[in-house]
Amino acid sequence: MKEFLTQEFNKLFNKNPENTYFSPGRVNLIGEHIDYNGGLVMPCAITFGTYLLASPNSDGIFRFRSLNFDDKLDIPVQEEYTKTEEYWFNYPLGVIEYFLKDGHPVLGMDMLFYGDIPISSGLSSSASIEVVTAFALNDMLNAGYSKLDLVKLAKSVENNFIGVSCGIMDQFAVAFGEKNKALMLNCDTLDYKAVDSNLGEYILAIINTNKPRKLAESKYNERVEECQAALKALQQELSISHLCDIDTGTFNKHSHLITDPVVYKRAKHVVEENDRVKLAAAALSNNNLDELGRLMYASHDSLRDLYEVSGAELDTIAEYCKTDADVVGGRMTGAGFGGCAIALVKESAFDKFSNNIIEYYTQKIGYAPSVYSSLIGNGVGVL
Ligand code: GLA
C-alpha cells in the first residue's frame, strides 16, 4: 500500500513524500452515546483507516489531494481558515486552523489522503482524517503536542469547525488504539486501560448497512441537547456534572424530576448503558462471551427504543443475529442513523454467517449490506 501511494504522490507532486502516516477508524464494542455524558466506553481501533503522505513545500501553499474524491484544494498559508461547504478537505483545513489558533506557525504542504474506511459508514472516517492530519503536522512542524493534546484538538475541530457536538471517544480510540485490545475509556477523566479483546472462538464482524446517513448530524446534536436537558432537571436534587455520574438505582429515585417523556427516555438509556459497560468489562475479562453478547443485544434494544437512533436497517441486522446460533451478540455501533453494526460470530462459521445475513437483509431492505471480518489494530502512527 505504501509503495502504491508513494507512486500516486509522485504523479501528483513530482517528488517523494517526506513522510507517510496512518490513522485507523474505530468500532465501539459497547457504551453508545455515552462519551458526551461523561461515562465509560469500550472502543477498538480497526485496520481500515486513513493514509496521509505529506511533504512541506516552499510555495506557502497547502495542496490537498485525495484518491477517494475528485475535489481538491490549493490554498495559501493565511491567518485563519473557515469551512468551505461540505468538502472533505474541511477536516485537514480545520486542523490547520486549530494549530494556528494555538499559536503554531505552519508551512505550505503537499498532502495526499487515501482512506479505505467505507464512506459514511459510522466507522469514524472523520476522526481518522482529523487525527492523522494533526499527528502529521505535529510531527513535521515539531509542534510539541502530546497525543492526548492532539485528540483534544481533533475533537475541537469536529465540534467547532465542522459543527458536530461529538464526544471524545472516536478521536481517542483512533489515536490510542492497540492491536487486539479494547480501550476501557472513562470519558470524564480520560483515564483508560487497554484490555485484551480475547474473543476465544469468536471474531468481530462488521456489517455495513450501506444506508446513506442523512440527517445524522442534526439528530446527533439534538440527542446531545436532550441529555443536557435531563442533566439540568436532575441537578435540581443531585450535585452531578454528567448523567453518567449516577447509576440506574439513583436515576430511578430522581427521574420524576424529568418531566418531558422523550428526555426521560434518552436519560434512561444513558444511565443504563453506562451500567452495561461496567458489566461488559467484567464479562470480557472473565471470558464470559455469552454475557457480553447479552449486553450487546440489550444495548441495541435500548438504542432502538429509548434513544431512537437505530432504524429498520440496523434493526434487521440485530434481529438476524439473534436467530443465528453461531452469533453470540450484536448491536449497532457508533452514532446510528444507518452506518454499521457489529456481531460476535464463531470464526469457523463466518462465511455462512456472511452469506445468510446478506440474504436476510437484502430480502427485507432491498439492497445488500457489506460484511467484513474486522481486525483490531493500532492507533495513529508513522508508516
Ligand atoms: C459518534 C460520535 C462519538 C460518540 C458516538 C456515539 O461516533 O463521534 O463521539 O458519541 O457517535 O456513541
Image (spheres, helix red, strand yellow):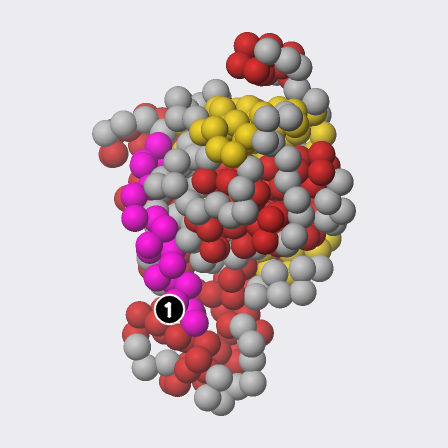
Q: Nearer the viewer, residue 289 or 123?
A: 123
At 36% from the left and 73% from the top, the residue drawn is 264
Which percent across, then down, holds residue 215? 30, 48
Q: Nearer the viewer, residue 278 or 166?
A: 166
Q: Is residue 259 magenta?
A: no
Which percent across, then down, holds residue 267? 42, 70
At 44% from the left and 47% from the top, the residue drawn is 82
The image shows residue 6, relative to residue 48, as above or below, that is above
- Mark 1, Cα crowd under 10 Å, few <14 / some 14-19 / many 20+, is some
Q: Is residue 220 magenta?
A: yes
For residue 15, side relative to residue 228 (left or right): right
- SS state under label 1: helix
Which percent across, then down, holds residue 299? 46, 55
**According to the image, label 1 marks what residue?**
226
Give the overall secondary structure of the magenta segment: helix
Q: Amino acid type of disc 1?
A: Glu
Q: Nearer the viewer, residue 216 or 301?
A: 216
Q: Quadrant location of the N terminus?
A: top right
Rendering quarter of residue 281: bottom right
For the question of whether residue 344 can be seen, the reply is no
Q: Is mark 1 within 8 Å of ligand 1?
A: no
For residue 154, side relative to residue 72 (left or right): right
At 27% from the left and 27% from the top, the residue drawn is 367
The image shows residue 365, relative to residue 188, as above or below, that is above
Which percent across, then down, holds residue 57? 63, 25
Rendering quarter of residue 53: top right
The range drawn in magenta is 209-228
Q: Quadrant location of the C terminus?
A: top right
